[in-house]
Image (cartoon, rainbow, N blue to C red):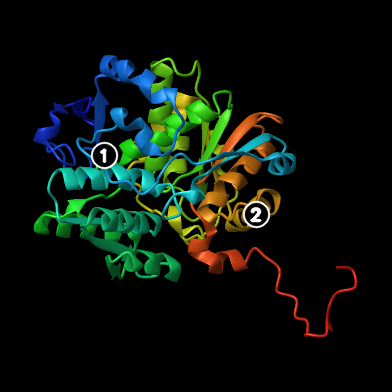
Amino acid sequence: MTLVEALACERCGRRYAPADVEYTCPEHDGVAGILDVRYEYDAVSDELAGVLDGPTEDLWTYEPLLPVDGEPVRLGAGGTDLLDAPALGDALGVDALVKNETTNPTGSNKDRGSAVAVSRARQQGHDVVACASTGNAAASLAGYAARAGLDCRIFVPADLPEAKAVQPRLYGATVLGVDGTYADAYELCREVSAERGWYNRNAAMNPYAVEGKRTLGFELAEQAPDADWVAMPMGNGCSLAGAWKGLREFERLGVVEDTPKLLGVQAAGATAIHDRFVAESDDSDAGSRTGEREDGGDTTADSIDVGVPHNAGKACRALAESGGDAVVVSDEAIRDAQRLLGECEGVFAEPASAAAVAGIRAAVDRGTVAPGERVVTVATGTGLKDSASAREAVDDVISVDAAGQGLPEDL
């Protein structure tokens, strides 16, 4: 029995029983009426002691706080390490920690959302699940669908990095390369899923996927209760909004006394959430947040290359409520940060993950983050998904023959 009280529309405030609505508020067109899952917090509080007594093995440690009835789909998502990162901290001028989400079963934090969404799909008797993705959610949904015995349909931009297109196919998913942007793939997935009765995991549209993402906030509250900042990349804004919801809930329930500020980081080729946050800010210095910009509407950080983010409102509220900030970083800064994270801490992160590190550096340079503050950077996805981009951040291989000719003297 879940502890869900209602689903509430983020736009108009209407509330629905879970059985009465599946995706978005019917009073609004498309995905405008995003629904937020609300809980019976008195009952949640009663369940909490048992949840916190033992180790966090995976996200289903928090099962009593998640909106799933019956046996969930388990693949090992969550329970990821929080790494002390002294070398990275020295380079950035902060007390750094790395939340290493690259070790999730399909290689990214998207597994948290897919675990809950696919469990809901199976619970409701669906045979097919679908989503649009820039790559990580595709692999995640496909992996969890395979584990659950469900068919999977994935809509991706046709120019997706090859590794990200291969992984979901290996899990048995049908991948449809859409000749267009992520926004085009998203809309096509929404239309086709509705026509064919597929369960749609699309970001923001599915209210339950973000509930899995809030377990990141639970873990951060337990692992780093004294953090001053949490830095995360932003594409659609769902991961940041979900983590903030989890942090706020654990504050409300008395697990922690305070919450960290959020630093939302976007790549210069896709800045919609940052721009909205700046526009809504009352800070007269908001314009200084814009950072270095690039033209062309594109970025090497494909996981956050989202021109029309569907959860921008939630993300901006999370940034504002936390007292946080948003920054934009260039692709060059992302490549430098990708190498820095690897060399300093042994974490191979994809460009979107490294954007968070670049964002910390930018925020320190700007004075937003003070020297020595305790900052968690969330490494959201593994660099193994996009080794082509990583090649741009590293030196060439040194060629030597079998006799050692060509070996540098100063090696």
Residue 333: percent from left, percent from top: 63, 53
Badge 1 marks a residue whose secondary structure is loop
> Is 223 on the left-hand or right-hand side of 234?
right
Residue pictured at 29% horizontal, 68% vertical = 175
Residue 368 visible in this rendered orientation of the protein: no
Q: Residue furthest right?
A: 409
Q: Residue furthest front?
A: 54
The N terminus lies in quadrant = top left
Q: Mark 2 = which residue?
A: 342
Amino acid beneath label 2 = Gly
Residue pictured at 58% horizontal, 56% vertical = 348
Q: Nearer the viewer, residue 283 or 93?
A: 93
Q: Mark 1 = which residue?
A: 208
Amino acid beneath label 1 = Tyr
Badge number at residue 115: none
Q: Nearer the viewer, residue 156 or 148?
A: 148
Q: Residues within 10 Å of mark 1 (few under 14, many from 20)?
A: many
**Quarter residue 94 falls in:** top right
Residue pictured at 25% horizontal, 48% vertical = 118
Q: Considering only vertical position in the picture, is 247 above or below 133?
A: above
Residue pictured at 26% horizontal, 17% vertical = 43
Residue 231: percent from left, percent from top: 54, 38
Nearest to N terminus: mark 2 or mark 1: 1
**Quarter residue 375 falls in:** top right
Residue 357 visible in this rendered orientation of the protein: yes
The C terminus lies in quadrant = bottom right
Cα gap from disc 2 to disc 1, whole angstroms: 33 Å
